[in-house]
Amino acid sequence: MALRINPSILASDFANLESELGRIKNADLAHVDVMDNHFVPNLTLGLPVVERLQQVSPIPLDVHLMIDAPERWAPQYAELGAYSVTFHAEAVGRDSDPVAVARSLRERGARAGLALKPGTDAEPFLELLPEFDMVLVMTVEPGFGGQSFMPETMPKLRTLSQAVRDSGLDVWLQVDGGINDDTIGIAAEAGATVFVAGSSVFGAENAGAQVDHLRELAAG
Ligand code: DX5
Ligand code: ZN
């Protein structure tokens, strides 16, 4: 199983996003955190900015939507060409469901990702795995970079990893939050295959070298 490192540009210099993307050319995908100040208590960027990032990024975009009403917005991120669009299970509105959102993404050529907050169990979603290309196990409460990894989320990752293996499906398992030199091995051992790292990568003097370093640590 290929391991992927996706730096989160939340930890980069927002006044210089194009050059910041240039620091992580050797990474797999650029992780873009979209926050609406409703689903999470923080506000970042939205469609017009992500559209420009898509045009200038040397690597594909991995969009993480921390927003209410993903059924309304997620398809538009797929339309603009994002490689992967992940929305939160907890955010899907009453008039929609995660499967409908996932199908709207796949129809537009994007990989569909389902994100689970630390307190959300995986069990109700295991039967939906065929509808998704990725499950994101949040390893911090979503909303801010620079928080500490929550090891108590690892049993959920193991459950998902076992379910993916049993299904034979090619579903990526992503972890996001507090991933650094000390924690990436723990998540890899529990079955993660895609690692988001914000402060650990963009806080390094040589971001590209840190991407390679994390990849080696994940491989064990
Ligand atoms: C948090 C975001 C993360 C964040 C990770 O809500 O989803 O992607 O940028 O940042 P670090 O790696 O610093 O924990
Ligand atoms: Zn994220």
Image (cartoon, rainbow, N blue to C red):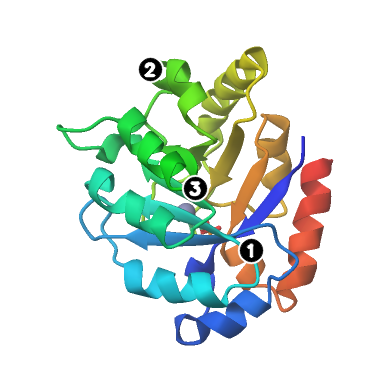
Give coordinates of residue 32: x percent, y percent: 48, 62
Location of mark 2 (residue): 124
Q: In the figure, is residue 209 to the left or right of 90?
A: right
Location of mark 3 (residue): 110
Mark nearer the N terminus (3 vs 1): 3
Q: In the figure, is residue 161 to the left or right of 46?
A: right
Q: Quadrant of the N terminus?
A: top right
SS state under label 3: loop
Instruction: Give the CA distance from mark 3 to mark 1.
Output: 27 Å
Tag nearer the camera, 2 or 1: 2
Assess mark 2: CB under 8 A from ligand 1? Answer: no
Q: Nearer the viewer, residue 80 or 23?
A: 80
**Is the residue marked by circle 2 packed among few (<14), some (14-19), or many (20+) residues within 10 Å?**
few
At 60% across and 61% down in the image, what residue appears? Answer: 60
Look at the picture and state if 138 lies above or below 65. above
**Is the residue marked by circle 3 packed among few (<14), some (14-19), or many (20+) residues within 10 Å?**
many
Give coordinates of residue 29: x percent, y percent: 62, 58
Mark nearer the N terminus (2 vs 1): 2
